[in-house]
Image (tube, grey):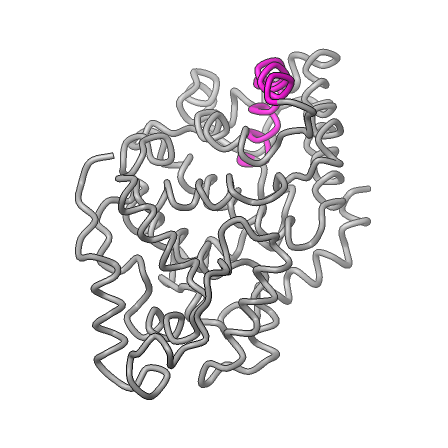
Amino acid sequence: GGGGGGASVTSLVSRALSAGNVGGGGSSRNDTDEDDTGVLFGLALDDALRLQLQRLVVQPNVSREAAARVRVPLFVSDCAQHILLHGLDSSGIFRESGALSKVLELKAVYNRNDPRMAAALAASGGALQGIKDPNIVASLLKLYVRELPAPLLTFELYSKFLGVAAADVAQPKGLKAIVEQSNPLSPRARASGHAGGFGEVDMSARAVVADLHRLVCELPKANRHLLATLMGLLWVVSRSAHRNKMSASNLAVVFGPNILYGKYNSSAEQSSAMQADTTAVCKVVTLLIDYQEEIFGGRAAMIRRIRSEGGSGQDVAGDDDDADDDDDDDDDDDDDAE
């Protein structure tokens, strides 16, 4: 990965704990509700969001209504903000690995079931404050997605998503066209001066993206919200591919196997199936990235807000507008898919 991680995360949080009245009282381990149960990594999305809500509602100046409108783990917003601010020009972002020791240290900090630790992180500007290498943060985000107990696109919809990629067999020019045209490094995009959007691509390509939209609407809400946020982030990263070398297709190679995979009876069966399905998985994720606006609608606004305002998960009330968009999207999903 290269580049240092800045000051020790543990030392930053320790200073915050001791500097002033965070949670009240001293810093003795016995004064906290800490236990060994993780609150983020490896936890089902619904469970992580429930625990996050419990933490948020006891924070000063955060209403229960505002806390309930936070639809993704704030950890993800923290990572997205850091990458948007520091990682867009980093060559190989998400492909290059950050220092493993620093990644694991950050994981431990975010995963601690300690309310006073959560308050300390908020008071000190977050655990990512002072991290200089964006590859550390990108690796941490990939690790979180990889350790979800089930794939983000779910076991149940795996074959359906691969079926969308199979449209390449029936309409090879259509699907190939939108993948190539959306890649800012491709000759097709350079020649047309266009990257992203449908342009002159035929109607069969539009149908492929419409099918993806319908499948995304079948995902559980928590999965859909997180997927929209991730794809919005990856879309912004891919727009700087001329600098960071990470086009949508390159990002799909990195993320695809972590968010779209099936359920297998043995590791040998899994390895064989993943090799056979790699191309289809990457096509699906490439399309999810390039056409995130068409597929997810209003949720893409979250990434734009984080990028333009430098907003992070700490500004809980700031998620109200996005949550309203979500509610509208949920109500209109069936209509949009028509």
**In this figure, what is the number of numbered marks?**
0
Residue 171 placement: quadrant: top right
- Is residue 98 rendered to the left or right of residue 238? left
Specify whether residue 72 is painted magenta: no
Specify whether residue 271 is painted magenta: yes
Question: Is residue 121 placed above or below 63 in the rendered structure?
Answer: above
At horizontal 61% and vertical 24% (from top left) the residue drawn is 200
At horizontal 74% and vertical 35% (from top left) the residue drawn is 157
Name the magenta segment's main secondary structure.
helix
Question: Is residue 296 placed above or below 155 in the rendered structure?
Answer: below
**Bounds of the magenta span?**
267-290
Q: Residue furthest front?
A: 30
Percent coordinates x, y for residue 135 in the rendering? 30, 40
Residue 71 placement: quadrant: bottom right
Q: Nearer the viewer, residue 236 or 1?
A: 1
- Is residue 322 rendered to the left or right of residue 214? left
- Is residue 81 rendered to the left or right of residue 42? left
Quadrant containing the N terminus in the rendered view? top left
At horizontal 65% and vertical 17% (from top left) the residue drawn is 269
Percent coordinates x, y for residue 29 in the rendering? 34, 74
Percent coordinates x, y for residue 216 in the rendering? 70, 42
Q: Nearer the viewer, residue 285 or 146?
A: 146
At horizontal 25% and vertical 74% (from top left) the residue drawn is 16
Q: Nearer the viewer, residue 94 or 43?
A: 43
Question: Is residue 122 placed above or below 130 in the rendered structure?
Answer: below
Quadrant containing the C terminus in the rendered view? top right
Percent coordinates x, y for residue 169 in the rendering? 71, 11
